[in-house]
Image: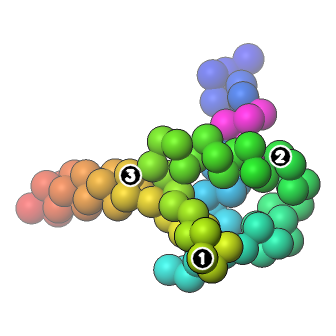
Amino acid sequence: MKESDRHILAVSAALEVLTAFDRDVPLRLKDLHERTGQNRSKLLRLLGTLENHGFVQFNPGEGTYELGGVLHRLGALMNDRLSRVDA
């Protein structure tokens, strides 16, 4: 079996949550459920973990989630890398 054929289900589920964000629009738990098909309790655990590590932010006043600062930092690193390749 190739390494690329091995998966950790919890990591795959968390990545599915992150890729559910397709625009810079905050999402409610209901939206994430509709986009991922994951149940509420699993989503809350995944979102709590992602929030703890800075991948998402929760806005309690609105009851919404949005992408966090860690993803901005990683995107900037990737942008820098791609800029060096193009140069």
Give the x, y percent position of residue 12. 71, 41
Ranked by sequence position, the earlier of labels 2 and 1 is 2
Can you identify the residue that label 1 sits on? 61
Can you identify the residue that label 2 sits on? 42
Secondary element under disc 2, as helix, strand or loop, is helix
Secondary element under disc 1, as helix, strand or loop, is loop
Residue 75's quadrant in the figure? bottom left
Which image quadrant: the N terminus?
top right
Q: What is the crowding at mark 3: few (fewer than 14 residues within 10 Å), some, or many (at least 20)?
A: some
Q: Nearer the viewer, mark 3 or mark 1?
A: 1
Decide: is 37 above or below 12.
below
Residue interval drawn in magenta: 9-13
Q: Is residue 3 magenta?
A: no
Which image quadrant: the C terminus?
bottom left
State the residue lying farthest toward the front. 61
Q: Residue at x 76, y 51 (%)?
A: 44
- Cα–Cα gap, marks 3 and 1: 22 Å
State the residue lying farthest toward the left. 87
Q: What is the crowding at mark 1: few (fewer than 14 residues within 10 Å), some, or many (at least 20)?
A: few
Q: Nearer the viewer, residue 48 or 35?
A: 48
